[in-house]
Each structure stands twice: as C-alpha cells, then as structure tokens.
Image (cartoon, rainbow, N blue to C red):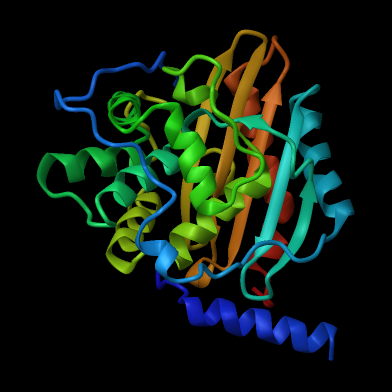
Amino acid sequence: MNRRTVALCLLASGLLAATVVGVTTDGGAVARSGDRVPAVSSTGPLNAVKPVDCRTTTRGDAALAQEVAAAITEVAPGTRVGLAVHDRLTNTTITSLNADEPFYTASVVKLLIAIAVLHEANWQVPEGQDRADLAAMLSGSSDPVASALWGAHGATDINHEVSALLGLGGTSPPSQPGQWEMTRMSPRDVVRVYEFIDTEMPGPARDFVVGALADATRVAIDGFDQYFGIPDALPGAEKAVKQGWMHIRNGLVLNTTGMIGAEGRYVVALLTEGPAASTFDPATTALTRGVAVLAPTLTGPEG
C-alpha cells in the first residue's frame, strides 16, 4: 500500500478550502527487561514540526450511519453503535454516529501501545525478537505481547501521553491499570490515530506499522477469526486493519477499524457494545453486514 504524504493532506485541505470559500487478558504482565522503560512523552521530535491536521471538517450523511446501525441491530439487537468514516482525500466525514462517545477498545488500543513504543525509540523500529513481537501484536493481535509492552511503557501513562501527543479528546484509561483492553476511545479518536500513523509518523515506523496492519492474519494468535467487519465485507479492497473483541461483565465488545482503498483514502472506525446475552456469533456477522452497507461508498467509482 503506498502511503499518502503530508503534502497530499495539505493539498486536500487547500482544495477543500477553495471549494467552500471559494481476547482479553487481565494485563499487568511484567516486562521482559528488569528496567522500567520511560513513559512516552508529549515532547519529542514531532514537536519540532507542526503536525498536519487531517481531522474531520464536516459532518456527513447521517442517514448512511443509521443504515449501518440498522443492519447491525437487525442481527444483534440491542447493540450500541459508534461510527466514523473519514475521506482523507477531501478531508471530510462521510458519515458518523455517536462519533464522540467512548467505547471500550479491546485490542484496538494496541495501536496506542505501538505508537508509545516507537515514539520512545525516537521512531526507530526495533530489530530481532522485539520487532517480531511488535508485529505479532499488530498482525496477530497478541495479548501477551500487548501486556508486556503495556507494563514496560507506563501502563495508563500510555493513554494520557499518547492522547496528548495526538490531540485525542475522547480517550480515557482503564480503571484498573493492568487492564489495557478496558481503555475507552471515541470513533473519532480512532480515526485520528490512523491519520497520525499514516501521515505524521516518520517513514520507517509508519511503513512498519501499516505493513503489519495490512498483513493481519485471519486467525489471531488466540484462535479468534478476526476477519469480521472490514476484511470480510471488503475482501477485494486494499486495507490495513486493527480489530477488537472481548466479553465484559455486562456485554460484548466488537470493533472493526482500519484504512481502506488506494493510499488508505478512507478510514473507518466501527465500535460496538452488545448486551449481556450477546455472543460472538452472530455479533461478528452483524458487523460484517454493517460494513457491507458502506461498501458502495468505499469501493465505488469515485473511490
């Protein structure tokens, strides 16, 4: 997948302006190293250059979001749905629903963990086993790796400090520091994370992260089929995804997120929480049907 450059974001913003104005673990794993790694800082090399702001500028088609939610709840009644679909070429929201409300992330928080690890390393991708572990956390959704890195890189400090680095407004840490999967994020914040990774993260780190997400395995390391939602609904599309799934005390969390299309034009964040009686089947089917509603928009001639 070719990466969109910062210049493209600036060009897209300029064109728009010209138009308008003229499965879960309990976390807490001990890091493999006996030394505590400093928490990610909001100061660093990125602050020397003003980040490109490719965030949402307009609210899109509310009816489309309602169609997505209806497709999901028809199969999985009682599911709460959060959605943000962003077109990075035009810098607009295609559609959204509950886009600023918090949802449990489950494994989607592994994107924040990866950012923390790479930022602390001055955006240098590790080598050897550390590189393999980081890739396994992103491609195969490895919980043991996530727990180790979470503990080694500051636990809930990751939530606070990566939020400050990226300007996230709807992200909050888990109430129990070891439970990384209980982080909450808004769909709009998830979109912002993908934009940061693909347009503001230095090249080698960006290529590593996006490449790992593009290589997401059908079967995760815990044995779960993680091709629900975006992968199964858009089988022929170019994509880089991070999925999330877990049972919680009073329900079920299922999330499908990623960049879709040539140069990652579209970013989709579909986050859901089902009622206590929910099961992964048919909940995974429900999310796939929800994304299928978006398919004509994401893969049509104009895309």
Q: Residue at x 44, y 32 (%)?
A: 157
Q: Residue at x 38, y 57 (%)?
A: 210
Compared across the picture, whether 224 is left or right of 146 comes to right
**Could you tell me if residue 235 is visible in this image?**
no
Q: Quadrant of the N terminus?
A: bottom left
Of 35 and 226, the residue lying toward us? 35
Q: Residue at x 36, y 30 (%)?
A: 154
At 24% from the left and 50% from the top, the residue drawn is 121
Task: Where is residue 93? Give x, y as percent.
Answer: 74, 62
61 left or right, relative to 226 = right
- Left or right of residue 183: residue 197: left
Rendered view: 148 above or below 86? above
Q: Which residue of the protein is positioned furthest toward the left in this rendering? A: 128
Q: Position of residue 83 (x, y in %)?
A: 72, 45
Q: Is residue 287 left or right of residue 177?
A: right
Q: Position of residue 272 (x, y in %)?
A: 68, 31
Front-most of residues 121 and 134: 121
Residue 246 is at least partly visible in this image: yes
